[in-house]
Amino acid sequence: MNNEEPLRYWNNQEFGVIELAGPDSLDFLQRLTSQEFRNFKEGHHINGAVLTPTSQVIAFFLASYHQEKIYLLTPGKEAAGRLFNFLEKMHFAEDFTLKDVSQDFHHVVTFNGDTKELPGLSFEMRDLRILSFGSQKEKDEFVNSLKGVSEGNSQELDFIKALQGFPKWGLDFTEKNLVLEGPFDDFVSRNKGCYPGQEVVERVHTYGNVAKKLTWLNSSTENLLTLKPGDKIIAGDLEVGTVTSILPNAEKSQAVVTALVRKPHYKPETQVTVNGKALTVKPIPHSFQIEE
């Protein structure tokens, strides 16, 4: 995080929140999620996922340990429902309680600035931080304390999320995708025991056999804002993928273009064309790069 830049914030952001409390909660998450929870302690943050046996994504989450309770924050209420249903289905005799507490929290997203002393329950989303308050009053008091700080708009936040390497759920990435088809290598621990989807994840790391992958498409000369989701990507005489989203910045002077590209054409610096425009394949930050 670049603390030299001024703090920016977005108010009234909606997220789903799942609470686990009890002595068996850590072991339960260790067994069922893609992340390492054995050393999870007060103040720790983890990005993770729950996967199908074939490593397709059921839901992503950001985890925080706070006052002997673990909170799993999801991108939205729909994802919270999928996550809760999965965990409830797998919860048998373990000694912990599982609750959907989404309605109990009010959220603000911040970016840049010195966030060490920010209040509320905190979740780190790479260089973004989500502050979750237990009451509307607490959240409003924090927002009112940000004197001289302008609130960002939703388009700006979408652009920053894209630059941080977070594809847009439903456009770029869905429950049909394997987790390592996206830039989620840091959501998966390779230093833990078995969990649903691990065998496929390890096979990808070992053999590099992922058929398609999310990438960025870039150009220093072409106008990317004229592209649209669904545009076909061409390499030579072959159709090798599809544009999934175009997210412009607030000034509409640049855009993040995300695409799903087939192997081997997702290799960084591959030259492709879209609607006659010459573009270059670029890796999304945090994405697992497969050795050819």
Image: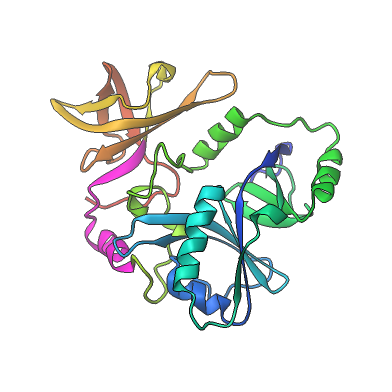
Q: Quarter of the image holding residue 44?
A: bottom right
Q: How is the image coloured?
A: rainbow
Left or right: 137, with 257 as reference point: right
Q: Is residue 119 above or below residue 189?
A: above
Give residue 14's position: percent from left, percent from top.
63, 44
Number of numbered discs on residues: 0
Give residue 203's position: percent from left, percent from top.
25, 63
Q: Is residue 35 visible?
A: no
Q: Is residue 52 above or below residue 159?
A: below
Left or right: 156, with 54 as reference point: right
Q: Is residue 206 magenta?
A: yes
Identify which residue is drawn at 35% across, 41% down.
214
Identify which residue is drawn at 73% across, 71% down.
67
- From the viewer's side, name the closer residue of 126 and 15: 15
- From the viewer's side, name the closer residue of 142 and 162: 142
Give residue 37's position: percent from left, percent from top.
53, 72
Left or right: 88, with 199 as reference point: right
Q: Is residue 172 magenta?
A: no
Q: Quarter of the image holding residue 216?
A: top left
Identify which residue is drawn at 29% across, 61% down.
54
Bounds of the magenta span?
198-215
Q: Is residue 193 above or below residue 168?
A: below
Give residue 5's position: percent from left, percent from top.
70, 37
Identify which residue is drawn at 77% across, 56% down.
134
